[in-house]
Amino acid sequence: GLAFSFPPPATLSDMFYDPFHAIFYLFFTLTACAIFGKMWTEVSGTSVRDVARQFRENQIVMKGHRDTATGKILSRYIPIAAALGGICIGLLTVIADYMGAIGSGTGILLTVTIIYEFQEALAKESQDVMRAMGMGMNF
């Protein structure tokens, strides 16, 4: 719908010829990324509640604060950090789009993310194999 109606400017000069389009694209992308970043914390297990629970389970306390106040203190920082992280990713995407990178900025970010996830999975499998080999030698 709306995202299809406002693709990124094709070149840097298009940004100057149609500044409304460029500004709207920037605002729309950064807002969507900030909202997605905040929503991602709820889905990924890094919400304020989850982090406060992990602190309690690992017996981590914040100096000068009670254990029960951890969630309240974290609620001041985690949503802001998540939104700021989303905005940074969105800004990177917009800059890549404005500069005319090969492919779109979003495509580049997706490619890097997929490769990174694949590398993490490969490293985990390698660790599991090494652990299994180590266990096999003990028998």
Image (cartoon, rainbow, N blue to C red):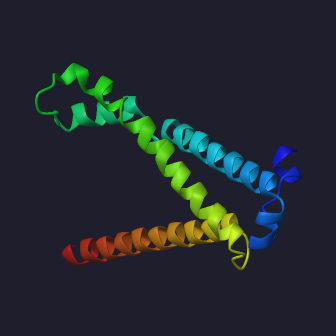
Could you say where residue 121 lies in the image, as x and y percent from the top left?
A: 48, 68
In the image, residue 14 lies at what x, y percent?
81, 68
User: What residue appears at the point 38 percent right and 31 percent down from the top-left corner?
Assistant: 48
In the image shown, does 114 or 36 lie closer to the viewer?
36
Q: Is residue 139 left or right of residue 123?
A: left
Quadrant housing residue 133: bottom left
Residue 127 visible, this angle:
yes
Residue 20 horizontal side relative to residue 133, left or right: right
Q: Do we see residue 46 in this rendering?
A: no
In this rendering, the answer to whether 89 lies above or below 56 is below
Name the spot of residue 37 as percent of width and height, x first. 54, 44
Is residue 67 positioned above or below 9 on the image? above
Q: Quadrant location of residue 32?
A: top right
Q: Is residue 29 above or below residue 97?
A: above
The residue positioned 29% from the left and 36% from the top of the image is: 54
Q: Which image quadrant: the C terminus?
A: bottom left
For the residue pair 42 and 11, the one nearer the viewer reads as 11
